[in-house]
Image (cartoon, rainbow, N blue to C red):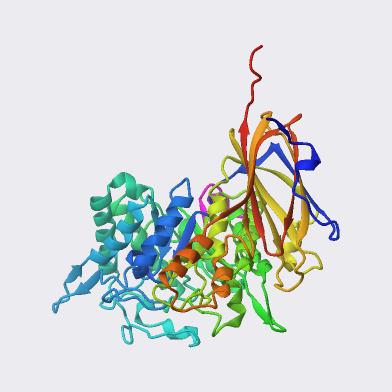
């Protein structure tokens, strides 16, 4: 039975009380590769990696992507017994005996990287922080920070330069060599290595000392594996004057300064990394996001890269890319972070990633990835408001956006949306107008197409009225197709809503946990088969609630009439 695609009668009905938004998608007009720049994740607490819920979440993240996912974690060289805590992790990779002789212990690091490799994931291996035995200021070393405490409390002995740069270099050399021995050259060649994190905040030495550490580190990595890829410097607040000064000095160091180890000019740089963060606030009792602030960091980072011919083809990685800066600061102590449990986080993620592609296009940089700094916090209260992808093994709505991204392959194609905020406007002013950002990101390969549509605003209380959206598609390559619509909103793909309906239990029963796990999965709200396409043109409509996200997945099928 044929169902004619261009006949309006089959379409999902919507109210005309709200003005319709129109989105035009041209599958024939390619705008760039649909690079999986979203397939990068990271977190502060590396020891969660091999714990129960950590392994479960990593399996889910690996499963949603058709390509290997890269994972970045802090504290891989920090001294300690591996007991996790908020904003803390340790591996005890380096200690010394009573005579100062190095002792290397890779047991915990192996547990972390084994967990990745078994799932087909790749480390974005962060070389840091300073082991206690090497620190120039080792005491105090382990912090006891908790949400609500001053952030500066975490900066202890691990943040200082080494007392012996040669011992540090040998540690790095032995780690890389061990990785090659354990996983093989081909595997480790596919990783990225990087030094430290946010040296304009996490480093208690001078800039000159940091660049010296970079020279010793890159030389050690390349001695152990000449084909290894390493870069830097994961600066914080990229758009700020101070961060720009750091980045310019870093580029100068890599191409013009004398290397502290080789005594030659320059240092290796195989990837350029910086950070981008938004800045939500509590305004009159509701959360107001600031996507523009995050996009300004990205704009500034891409602009700087584009200004240097030497960086033209070097991969650019946004080492942390998030709505704000502290994943472990829950909404109890930081009420502006109340966006994290529900659909505001998921719609923000959809809308902001679309702009990352557009910014990369505008500066013509080699944009490789953007690390979402969110994972899970083991054995913590349910829906505490951490910036995480799951709570106690139950997925949050935001993870379903990445499941949607995982279905987008091939080339990005042209989108023209009459209520999608202009790129310059959203970078300069965020999403603060009277209208919501009704936008789309679309992709197409030979057999499938995908259109992600969102209804986003910085203010979570701007409107509660669903938006009717008309989607016009042209360039459909076959005469029949199937369309599946996936949805994230208050009632679909949303374990947080389900948990609240249960009465917000902190000790849910096994039956309730299973119900929450099911509610946290990406849900289909309609599927249309055997849609007949006329002249490559099709029309869909949908009604999208505020902060909702839909993905229209198109499967192209060529129908041949039976021979008479």
Q: Nearer the viewer, residue 175 or 512?
A: 512
Q: Nearer the viewer, residue 524 or 304?
A: 524
- At horizontal 30% and vertical 76% (from top left) the residue drawn is 83
- At horizontal 54% and vertical 84% (from top left) the residue drawn is 332
Is residue 428 depicted above or below 382 in this figure? above
Is residue 287 depicted above or below 436 in this figure? below
Region of the chain picked out in magenta, as a range: 307-318
Q: Position of residue 148 (x, y in %)?
A: 50, 87
**Rendering quarter of residue 205:** bottom left
Residue reaching furthest left? 99
Question: Where does the C terminus fall, quadrant-wise?
Answer: top right
Q: Position of residue 322 (x, y in %)?
A: 56, 67
Q: Position of residue 441 (x, y in %)?
A: 66, 50
- Viewed as shown, does residue 558 lie left or right of 393? right
Residue 166 seen from this side: yes
Q: Position of residue 450 (x, y in %)?
A: 63, 44
Question: Where does the N terminus fall, quadrant-wise?
Answer: top right
- Viewed as shown, does residue 10 lie left or right of 76? right
- At horizontal 29% and vertical 53% (from top left) the residue drawn is 223
Q: What is the tally of numbered marks visible in this picture?
A: 0
- Viewed as shown, does residue 69 lie left or right of 14? left
Q: Nearer the viewer, residue 325 or 341?
A: 341
Is residue 317 depicted above or below 27 in this figure? below
Residue reaching furthest top? 564
- At horizontal 57% and vertical 40% (from top left) the residue drawn is 410
Is residue 308 on the magenta stretch? yes
Residue 300 seen from this side: no
Is residue 353 on the magenta stretch? no
């Amino acid at each position: 039975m044929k169902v004619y695609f261009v006949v309006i009668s089959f379409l999902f009905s919507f109210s005309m009380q709200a003005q319709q938004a129109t989105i035009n998608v041209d599958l024939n007009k390619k705008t760039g590769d649909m690079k999986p720049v979203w397939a990068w994740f990271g977190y502060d607490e590396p020891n969660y990696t091999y714990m129960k819920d950590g392994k479960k979440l990593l399996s889910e993240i690996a499963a949603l992507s058709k390509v290997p996912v890269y994972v970045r974690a802090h504290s891989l060289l920090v001294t300690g017994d591996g007991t996790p805590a908020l904003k803390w992790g340790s591996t005890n990779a380096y200690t010394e005996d009573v005579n100062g002789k190095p002792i290397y212990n890779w047991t915990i690091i192996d547990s972390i990287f084994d967990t990745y490799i078994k799932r087909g994931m790749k480390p974005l291996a962060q070389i840091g922080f300073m082991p206690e035995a090497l620190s120039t200021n080792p005491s105090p070393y382990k912090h006891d920070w908790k949400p609500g405490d001053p952030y500066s409390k975490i900066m202890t002995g691990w943040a200082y330069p080494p007392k012996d740069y040669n011992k540090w270099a040998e540690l790095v050399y032995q780690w890389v060599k061990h990785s090659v021995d354990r996983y093989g050259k081909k595997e480790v060649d596919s990783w990225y290595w990087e030094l430290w994190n946010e040296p304009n905040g996490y480093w208690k030495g001078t800039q000159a000392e940091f660049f010296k550490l970079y020279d010793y580190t890159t030389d050690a990595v390349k001695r152990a594996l000449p084909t290894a890829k390493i870069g830097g410097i994961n600066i914080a607040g990229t758009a700020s004057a101070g961060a720009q000064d750091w980045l310019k000095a870093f580029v100068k160091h890599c191409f013009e300064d004398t290397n502290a180890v080789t005594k030659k000019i320059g240092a290796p740089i195989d990837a350029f990394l910086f950070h981008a963060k938004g800045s939500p606030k509590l305004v009159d009792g509701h959360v107001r996001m600031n996507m523009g602030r995050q996009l300004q960091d990205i704009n500034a980072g891409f602009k700087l890269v584009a200004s240097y011919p030497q960086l033209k083809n070097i991969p650019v990685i946004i080492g942390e890319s998030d709505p704000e800066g502290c994943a472990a600061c829950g909404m109890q102590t930081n009420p502006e972070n109340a966006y994290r449990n529900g659909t505001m986080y998921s719609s923000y993620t959809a809308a902001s990633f679309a702009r990352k592609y557009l910014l990369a296009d505008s500066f013509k940089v080699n944009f490789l990835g953007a690390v979402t700094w969110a994972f899970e916090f083991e054995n913590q209260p349910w829906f505490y408001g951490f910036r995480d992808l799951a709570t106690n093994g139950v997925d949050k709505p935001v993870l379903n956006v990445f499941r949607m991204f995982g279905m987008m392959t091939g080339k990005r194609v042209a989108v023209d949306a009459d209520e999608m905020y202009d790129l310059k406007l959203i970078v300069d002013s965020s999403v603060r107008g009277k209208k919501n950002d009704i936008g789309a990101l679309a992709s197409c390969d030979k057999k499938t197409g995908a259109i992600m549509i969102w209804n986003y605003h910085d203010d979570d209380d701007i409107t509660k009225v669903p938006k009717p959206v008309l989607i016009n598609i042209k360039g459909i390559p076959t005469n029949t197709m199937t369309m599946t619509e996936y949805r994230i909103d208050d009632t679909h793909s949303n374990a947080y809503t389900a948990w609240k309906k249960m009465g917000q239990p902190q000790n849910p029963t096994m039956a309730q946990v299973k119900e929450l796990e099911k509610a946290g999965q990406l849900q289909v709200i309609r599927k249309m088969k055997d849609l007949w396409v006329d002249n490559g043109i099709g029309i869909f409509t949908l009604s999208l609630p505020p902060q909702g996200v839909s993905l229209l997945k198109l499967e192209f099928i060529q129908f041949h009439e039976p021979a008479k």
